[in-house]
Amino acid sequence: MAQRFAQFVMIQAQNILMMLGKIPTPDGEMYPPNFESAKMLIEQLEMMEVKTKGNLSPQEAALLEKAISQIKLAFIESTGGTPHTMIPSRPMGELPTMEELNEDEEEDEGTPEQLRPPAAEKPAASTPAPAPVVEEVENKKKFVKKYT
């Protein structure tokens, strides 16, 4: 069983190094780095270390600890000094803006211009708009959830 555990840890470490672009393919080409996948695999090894604490032999625990520390160093080298905990799960540059999301929704709905609500007119700068009056209703239920 100890041999299978060691093989598993080494295969995971090898996969992480491949995701970091440190191990060439059989053709001799290098994989492009995939930091998100490498981060996920590192976190899996860290989770395994936590979940198996106290259940491993001293040799297995040392192997896992050494593999994780070496993989973390390789990750930092590959990312130019950024630890894996600082890499976002999704690149921030790829997030759409609110305007893009609204445009996509409008295109999907196919709403004609005349059916869209008109834009609210701004009040004159010299006369401030009156504050809305809020009536308090004490005995009225605000939310009702029904199960059928």
Image: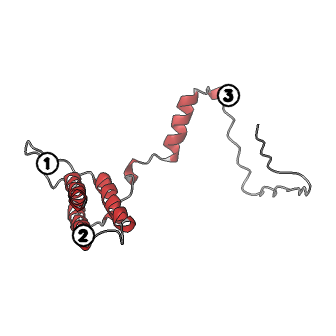
Q: Is residue 75 visible?
A: yes
Task: Using the rendered view, name the quadrant where residue 42 is placed.
Answer: bottom left
> Do labels 3 and 2 touch, CB within 8 Å?
no
Amino acid on which the number 1 mark rests in the picture: Met
Which badge, 1 or 2, is on the more N-terminal residue? 1
Q: CA distance from mark 3 to mark 2?
A: 60 Å
The quadrant in which the N terminus is found is bottom left
Report helix, strand or loop for mark 3: helix
Q: Is residue 43 left or right of residue 132?
A: left
Residue picked out by circle 3 = 115
The numbered dot on residue 69 is 2
Above or below, 113 relative to 146: above
Q: Select label 1 or label 2 by which is in front.
A: 2
- Residue extending furthest toward the right: 139
| Mark 1 crowdedness (10 Å alpha carbons): few <14, some 14-19, many ≥20 | some
Amino acid on which the number 3 mark rests in the picture: Leu
